[in-house]
Amino acid sequence: MRYIFRFVLILVILGGLAVTGYTFVGDLSPQRAPVETPITLEVN
């Protein structure tokens, strides 16, 4: 049982390090681009 808990603890630590590393290395900012939508107005 002790080995299973140790294995799970190591997996949790490695997962936390992976998420932390991805937030620093990965580009999480949204891409910005102008959006134009033509609108037709009917005037009576």
Image (cartoon, rainbow, N blue to C red):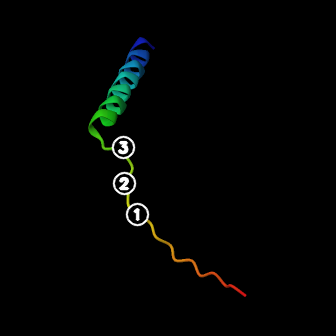
Residue for badge 3: 28
- For discs 3 and 1, the disc positioned in front in the rendered view: 1
Give me the disc on residue 34: 1
* Residue beneath the point at 34% across and 35% down: 23
Q: Is residue 26 left or right of residue 41?
A: left
Secondary structure type for disc 3 = loop
Q: Residue at the top extreme? A: 2
Say whether disc 3 or disc 1 marks the residue closer to the N-terminus: 3
Secondary structure type for disc 1 = loop
* Residue beneath the point at 36% across and 54% down: 31
Residue 8's quadrant in the figure? top left
Q: Is residue 44 left or right of residue 35?
A: right
The correct choice, above or below, for 40 with respect to 22 in the image is below
Please tell me which residue lies in front, 29 or 41. Answer: 41
Q: Quadrant of the C terminus?
A: bottom right
Query: Residue 9 at x, y = what percent?
Result: 40, 18
Query: Residue 32 at x, y = what percent?
Result: 38, 56
Q: Is residue 40 left or right of residue 29?
A: right
Query: Residue 10 at x, y = what percent?
Result: 35, 21
Q: CA distance from mark 3 to mark 1?
A: 19 Å
Q: Residues within 10 Å of mark 3 (few under 14, many from 20)?
A: few
- For discs 2 and 3, the disc positioned in front in the rendered view: 2
Please tell me which residue lies in front, 1 or 12. Answer: 12
What amino acid is found at the position of numbered circle 2 in the picture? Gln
What amino acid is found at the position of numbered circle 1 in the picture? Pro
Residue for badge 2: 31
Please tell me which residue lies in front, 34 or 26. Answer: 34
